[in-house]
C-alpha cells in the first residue's frame, strides 16, 4: 500500500466560513464583515454572520467528525475574535472558544491542525493600513503568541497563512475578496512582502514558545502545470511553467516559496517586476526564511502545458472541449495531484502536505433524506489515485486534508457552492452527511485501500 501507515487523513475548514462572525458575540469585525456589506460584492448578498453557526455547535460538529472517523482537522483561528482591535486587548471569551474547541476535538480523538490566518484580518488593522503597513508583521507575531501560549500544550501542528496569493492578489489587486482594494502592483508586492515577514515571525514565535515539539508550515495555493504527454520535453515544459509567473501577478508558486524556503525572491520575477519589487530591509529575507517541516499546498486543478514544437518554450494547451467542471467551472484535472507534489518536492525537498483539495457542487437533500454526491466521490477517487501514484514514485507526502468538512460560506459566491462532505441546511442548521462522507470514512479506515481505482 503506497499510503504510509502514519498518513494523515483529514478535513479542513476556516473560521469566517463556518463559525458565525465574531462581532455578533463580542469580538471584533474583520475585513470580510466590511466587504460583505459592499453592494454586489457577494453573489447571493450573504455574509458570515451566522454561517454554519459552528461557534455554538462545535460540540455537535466534533461528535460528527468522530462519527465519520476523521482523525485530523485543519481549522483556523479568527484573529478579531481573539483580539477585537487586532492588537492589545485579548477577548478572553473569544480565546476560550478555541481552548474549548481543541479540548473537544482531542476528547473525540481528533488531532487539531491550526491555521493562524485564513483571511479574516481585523478591520481595525485595515484602518491602519493592513498588510501595507510594515507593522503588520509584528501585529501578527503578537497575535500568534497569544494563540500559541494558549493552545500549544495540545496543538502540535501549525500553519501560519492560508493562500497569500488570494488575500493579497484577490483582496488587494483585483478586489474580488476582502478588503476589496485595487492597488498598484508595487503596493501589492509590498503587502505580500509584509505578509511573508509576518509568516516568518510567526514561525519564530511557534518555535520559541511551543509547549511541546510541533510541526510548522503554511498553506499557499499550489497551482501546478501538467505535462500534456510523458515526453521529457513536455515534462520539462510543465516544470518550467509551474515555476514561472505569467506577468505582473501574484499567481505564482516561486514568488512565495523561494523567499520562504530559499531566502530570496526568484531571479526571473525580480527581472520581470523591475522597480515594482519590494526592497527588503536588512534581515528581512532571513526572517522570512525560517526552517519549515513541510510544504503545504492547496491544490484544486492544474493547467496542461506542452513544449512548443518550434521554440521548445512551454505553451498552455486549452482544456479539451467538454472537460468535467465543478460549479466554479474549475476543470477536473486529477493529474494536478500527481505533478504538483512531484514538482514541489523536487524543487523544495520538503515533505508535502495537501492542505486542501475538493470541489464545489450544488448538492441537495434527496427525497430519501440523503445527499447523493457521486461526482464528489469520483473526483476525490481520481485525485487520491494521483496522489497515491506520486507516493509510489517516491514523493514524500505526509497528509491530505479534504476541503471541506461541511458546506460553508464560499467567499464571494456566498452559500451558492457547496464544498462539504456534510450538507448544511442554512435555515435549520441541520447537518446531513453526504454519501461522500461515508465513502471518505471507509477510505480513512482502510488507509486508502477502498478507493476505486
Ligand atoms: C481557499 C480557501 C478556501 C476555499 C476553497 C474553495 O483556500 O481558497 O482556503 O477557503 O473555500 O479553496 O474555494
Image (cartoon, rainbow, N blue to C red):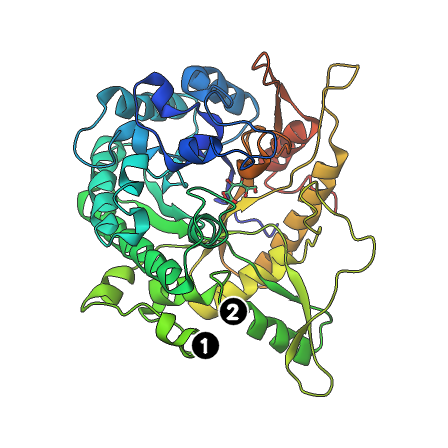
Residue 181 appears in the picture as rendered: yes
Furthest residue toward top:
428
The one nearer the camera, 243 or 410, is 410
Cβ at disc 2 under 8 Å from ligand 1: no
Cα distance, mark 2 to mark 1? Answer: 9 Å
Horizontal side, residue 134 vs residue 370: left or right: left
Q: What count of labels does the image hold?
A: 2
Mark 2 lies on a secondary structure that is: loop
Q: Which residue is mark 2?
A: 245
The answer to whether residue 204 is above or below residue 83 is: below
The one nearer the camera, 383 or 168, is 168
Q: Position of residue 250 (x, y in %)?
A: 47, 61
The one nearer the camera, 22 or 290, is 22
Res. 272 mark: 1
Which quadrant of the figure has residue 145? top left
Q: Position of residue 240 (x, y in %)?
A: 56, 75
- Do callouts 2 and 1 mark residues in contact (Cβ within 8 Å)? yes
Mark 1 lies on a secondary structure that is: helix
Residue ID at (22%, 22%): 92
Residue ID at (62%, 71%): 238
Amino acid at each position: 500500500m503506497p499510503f504510509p501507515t502514519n498518513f494523515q487523513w483529514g478535513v479542513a475548514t476556516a473560521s469566517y466560513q463556518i463559525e458565525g462572525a465574531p462581532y455578533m458575540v463580542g469580538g471584533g469585525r474583520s475585513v470580510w464583515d466590511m466587504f460583505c456589506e459592499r453592494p454586489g460584492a457577494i453573489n447571493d448578498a450573504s455574509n458570515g454572520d451566522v454561517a454554519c453557526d459552528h461557534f455554538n455547535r462545535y460540540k455537535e460538529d466534533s461528535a460528527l467528525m468522530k462519527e465519520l472517523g476523521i482523525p485530523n482537522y485543519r481549522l483556523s483561528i479568527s484573529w478579531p475574535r481573539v483580539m477585537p482591535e487586532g492588537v492589545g486587548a485579548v477577548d478572553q471569551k473569544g480565546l476560550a472558544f478555541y481552548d474549548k474547541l481543541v479540548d473537544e476535538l482531542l476528547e473525540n480523538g481528533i488531532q487539531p491542525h491550526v491555521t493562524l490566518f485564513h483571511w479574516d484580518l481585523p478591520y481595525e488593522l485595515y484602518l491602519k493600513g493592513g498588510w501595507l503597513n510594515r507593522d503588520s508583521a509584528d501585529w501578527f507575531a503578537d497575535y500568534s503568541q497569544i494563540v500559541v501560549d494558549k493552545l500549544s500544550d495540545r496543538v502540535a501542528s501549525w500553519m501560519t497563512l492560508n493562500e497569500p496569493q488570494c488575500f493579497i492578489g484577490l483582496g488587494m489587486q483585483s478586489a474580488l475578496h476582502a478588503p476589496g482594494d485595487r492597488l498598484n502592483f508595487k503596493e501589492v508586492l509590498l503587502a505580500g512582502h509584509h505578509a511573508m515577514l509576518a509568516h516568518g515571525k510567526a514561525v519564530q514565535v511557534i518555535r520559541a514558545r511551543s509547549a511541546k515539539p510541533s510541526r510548522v508550515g503554511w498553506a499557499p495555493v499550489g497551482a501546478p502545470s501538467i505535462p500534456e504527454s510523458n515526453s521529457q520535453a513536455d515534462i520539462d515544459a510543465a516544470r518550467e511553467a509551474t515555476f514561472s509567473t505569467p506577468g505582473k501577478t501574484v499567481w505564482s508558486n516561486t514568488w512565495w516559496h523561494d523567499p520562504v524556503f530559499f531566502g530570496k525572491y526568484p531571479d526571473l520575477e525580480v527581472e520581470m517586476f523591475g522597480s515594482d519589487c519590494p526592497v527588503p530591509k536588512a534581515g528581512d529575507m532571513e526572517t522570512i526564511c525560517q526552517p519549515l517541516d513541510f510544504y503545504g499546498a492547496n491544490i484544486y486543478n492544474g493547467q496542461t502545458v506542452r513544449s512548443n514544437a518550434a521554440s521548445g518554450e512551454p505553451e498552455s494547451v486549452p482544456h479539451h472541449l467538454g472537460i468535467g467542471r465543478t460549479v466554479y467551472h474549475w476543470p477536473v484535472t486529477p493529474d494536478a495531484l500527481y505533478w504538483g507534489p512531484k514538482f514541489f518536492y523536487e524543487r523544495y525537498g520538503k515533505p508535502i502536505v495537501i492542505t486542501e483539495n475538493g470541489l464545489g457542487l450544488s448538492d441537495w437533500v434527496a427525497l430519501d433524506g440523503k445527499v447523493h454526491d457521486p461526482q464528489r466521490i469520483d473526483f476525490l477517487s481520481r485525485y487520491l489515485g494521483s496522489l497515491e501514484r506520486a507516493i509510489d514514485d517516491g514523493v514524500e507526502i505526509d497528509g491530505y486534508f479534504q476541503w471541506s468538512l461541511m458546506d460553508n460560506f464560499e467567499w464571494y459566491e456566498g452559500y451558492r457552492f457547496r464544498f462539504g462532505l456534510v450538507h448544511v441546511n442554512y435555515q435549520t442548521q441541520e447537518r446531513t452527511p453526504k454519501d461522500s462522507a461515508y465513502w471518505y470514512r471507509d477510505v480513512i479506515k482502510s488507509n486508502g485501500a477502498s478507493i476505486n481505482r
